[in-house]
Image (cartoon, grey):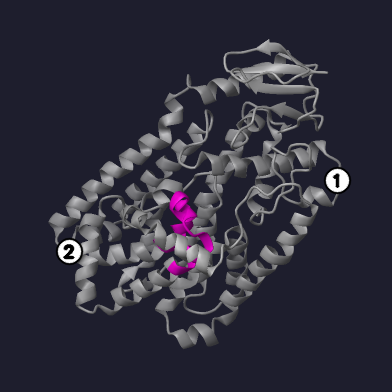
Amino acid sequence: MNIFQKINTNEKYRKIIISVILTKLALIFIASFNQMVSPHIHRQVDTLGVAMRYWLKMTHESFSLETILPAVINSGSGNGITPMEFPIINLLLAPFFIGSDLINIPIVTLVFVVLTIILWRLSYKSWDGVQIGKVEVKNVILWMPILSLTSIYAGKFIPDTIALFLILIAVGRSWDKPKIESVLYASVALLIKPVLVIGFGLFLYKDIKEVVIRYWYIWLVPILVALIYYTLGVAFITEHGSMNLFAIEVRGLSKGLLNFVKHSYKFPKLLNEMLFIRFASIVVFPFIIIKLFKRDSFVIRSLMILSLQLLSIAIIGGKEVYAHDYYFLGMVPILLLLSFSVLNKINNKLVVLVLMIFTFRTLEVFYSDSKPIFSSKKRHWRITEQCRQLKIENKNFPWSKNEVFRTSNEGYPLLAICLRERVGSTFSKYGVLYATDGIPEGCREIKRYKDIKAIECE
């Protein structure tokens, strides 16, 4: 038994791993008092904006069919309804905006982090006693929030990690015997993120006939549920909507696959992130290749499953997946199973090297996650404070009255989140712009702050 195996069987080390994970998630929560934690702030703000819009619908807008349909807060002059993944997370989080502007976003972030922890814990317990390739799967899941791509995205305000843990719960609970509850977990996972269908790849470690004959409803029913939503459901939302801001369409076999292959030079860098942890691939990858040449059945099957998963991602996402690497989260369980199988068998000197790389990379992630905590004088934090001050000093503005304010053009709705109001109007009497932006014709500046200014129009 080498050092890595001892770490995974010793209760003291297990507690250390859990402490590291909880520290990471706590940093993300504390940082939320200042701003979202990188990367992909654009996606996080969009997710938060849909949840906030549901809160505005519940409290400031009249109830109708449109109330239950997903909509963005940067709605412009339309209703802002937009086709997107099934908005169950946004709906669950919406009521937690009930607090004041000072605390409601951190509270929503805390609820999201707690939900992530609960699902991580449930997925860990779902795999208790299960081995794949002589690796305890629960040990893989225990480490997951601080390894591979999940070390980057666990706790971040995107739906992908939550969908990953849901699919792991579904597969884990039915590993020994199919259970109807797995259908529910998997259906929710695929409704949130259909690309997580590749999570069913874990079943391919079992006998294929058994998966088809005994397990058919565990994977087929969730796929059908997702297909119904992403065809009929999305068409219904589109019919009632005014915007199309979320990329949820399948790009097609030829276009997606060809674009993926065309940009495949980016994949080695991504693979470096996914094998255990960044730069540990210099140890793990060569041993996987050695086992492949030795015709190790577990490695061969794992690489075949990973190839199928990669093909699915390429078809669904095309070249865009390189810019949005959270699409690859569904591959993480099998990549880590491979990594653990290697680390369980190599000599202690190489294990120590990998653990040293892990330590430095974890500290790097901690530093990245905690940056907003120590950047209270930076622009995002200043704007948040100025929005709060602007709302206090301009009580004549129609705050909380379902007004759609004029704002500066933005790639994602930071000013909307800042104001807790719908934005994007071109004819509203009231608006908030960045200080450097020009004032629209027929409008006048009535209050200026360091980074933003309030305007009133005819």
Point out which mark residue 346 bears.
2
Can residue 168 be seen here? The reply is no
Residue 149, given in percent of the width and then of the height, sits at: 40, 52
> Of circles 1 and 2, which is in front?
1
In the image, what residue occupies the spot 44% across and 58% down?
328
Asked where in the image residue 221 lies, by quadrant, the reply is: bottom right
> Could you tell me the amino acid type at mark 2?
Ile
From the top left corner, tell me how far across and down residue 346 is, in percent. 17, 64
In-image side of 207 versus 100 (left or right): left
The chief SS type of the magenta part is helix
Q: Is residue 62 above or below residue 263?
A: above
- Horizontal side of residue 99 vs 178, given as left or right: right
Pointers 1 and 2 in contact (C-beta within 8 Å):
no
User: Which tag, 1 or 2, sits closer to the chain's start?
Assistant: 1
Residue drawn where x is 44% and y is 24% of the image: 375
Residue 414's x, y, as percent?
60, 32
Q: Position of residue 374 (x, y in %)?
A: 42, 25
Q: Residues within 10 Å of mark 2 (few under 14, many from 20)?
A: some
| Residue at which label 1 appears | 63
Mark linked to residue 384: none
273 drawn magenta = no
Q: Quadrant of the N terminus?
A: bottom left
Q: Is residue 430 left or right of residue 356?
A: right
Q: Secondary structure at mark 1?
A: loop
Q: Which residues are magenta?
A: 311-332
Residue 263 visible? The answer is: yes
Residue drawn at x 71%, y 13% is 445
| The magenta stretch spans residue 329 | yes
User: So how many labels did they put on this image?
Assistant: 2
SS at mark 2 in the image: loop
Q: Badge 1: few (under 14), some or many (20 or more) residues near its Cα, within 10 Å? A: few
Closer-to-camera residue (238/327): 238
